[in-house]
Image (tube, rainbow, N blue to C red):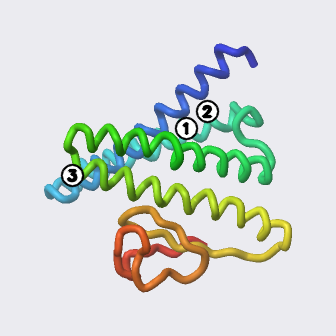
C-alpha cells in the first residue's frame, strides 16, 4: 500500500469514527426533544459510519492492528502520553481561559486514562496466565475497574448503579 493511500485510509477511519460518535450524540438529543424518527435516522447513519470506519481499519490491517500483545503495549503507551502530556496541557489551557467545567472534565479524563494504562499492563499478565477478566465501566466518567464495580466511582463519585458490566 502506498504511503499516501495509507495516510488517507487512516484519516478516513478517524473521520468516520468521529462521525459515528457525533451522530449517536445527535440521536440522544433528538430522543430528548421528542423526535424518535430523527433519532432513528441518526442511529442508522451512525451505524453506517461505523461500518465505514471498520472497513478502513480492516484495509489498514497490520499497519494499525497488530498482535494482541503489541496492541496492549501500544495502547499502554498512548494512554500514558495522553494522561501525562495531552490532558495536562488541555487542563492548563482551560484554567487559563477560566473554563472550570472543561478543566474538570479534562482532569477526570486524565485520571481515567491513567487507570486505563494500568489496566493494559495488567491485561498482559491475565493473557499470559489465561485468566478470564470482566470489567465494569462508569457511565459518567469512563473509569474502568476489573470485576465488580465499587460502591462509588473513585474519579467522579458516581454510584455503583452507574457502572456498566462489560463481559
Q: Is residue 154 above or below residue 3?
A: below
From the image, which quarter does the C terminus lie in?
bottom right
Q: In the image, what residue occupies the spot 77% across and 70% down?
A: 126
Query: Which residue has dot 2 on it?
Result: 56
Q: In the image, what residue occupies the spot 61% across and 36% down?
A: 55
Question: What secondary structure is found at the residue carrying circle 1?
Answer: helix
Q: CA distance from mark 3 to mark 2?
A: 29 Å
Q: CA distance from mark 1 to mark 3?
A: 24 Å
Label pair 2/1, CB-CB below 8 angstroms: yes
Q: State the mark number for residue 30.
A: 3
Q: Position of residue 140 (x, y in %)?
A: 36, 65
Q: Position of residue 15 (x, y in %)?
A: 47, 31
Quadrant in which residue 107 is drawn: bottom left
Is 20 left, or right, of 105 in this rendering? right
Query: Which residue has dot 1 on it?
Result: 53
Label pair 1/3, CB-CB below 8 angstroms: no
Question: What secondary structure is found at the residue carrying circle 3?
Answer: helix
Q: Nearer the viewer, residue 39 or 160?
A: 160
Q: Is residue 129 above or below residue 62?
A: below
Task: Give whichever of discs 1 and 3 has the lower sequence position.
Answer: 3
Q: Residues within 10 Å of mark 3 (few under 14, many from 20)?
A: some
From the image, which quarter does the N terminus lie in?
top right
Amino acid at each position: 500500500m502506498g504511503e499516501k493511500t495509507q495516510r488517507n485510509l487512516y484519516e478516513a477511519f478517524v473521520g468516520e469514527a468521529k462521525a459515528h460518535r457525533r451522530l449517536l450524540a445527535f440521536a440522544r438529543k433528538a430522543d430528548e426533544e421528542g423526535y424518535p424518527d430523527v433519532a432513528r435516522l441518526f442511529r442508522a447513519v451512525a451505524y453506517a459510519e461505523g461500518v465505514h470506519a471498520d472497513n478502513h481499519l480492516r484495509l489498514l490491517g497490520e499497519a494499525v492492528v497488530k498482535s494482541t500483545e503489541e496492541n496492549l503495549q501500544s495502547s499502554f503507551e498512548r494512554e500514558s502520553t495522553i494522561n501525562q502530556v495531552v490532558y495536562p496541557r488541555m487542563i492548563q489551557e482551560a484554567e487559563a481561559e477560566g473554563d472550570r467545567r472543561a478543566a474538570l472534565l479534562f482532569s477526570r479524563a486524565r485520571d481515567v486514562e491513567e487507570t486505563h494504562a494500568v489496566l493494559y499492563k495488567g491485561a498482559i499478565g491475565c493473557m499470559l496466565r489465561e485468566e478470564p477478566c470482566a470489567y465494569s465501566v462508569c457511565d459518567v466518567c469512563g473509569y474502568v475497574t476489573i470485576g465488580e464495580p465499587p460502591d462509588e466511582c473513585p474519579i467522579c463519585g458516581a454510584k455503583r448503579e452507574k457502572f456498566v458490566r462489560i463481559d
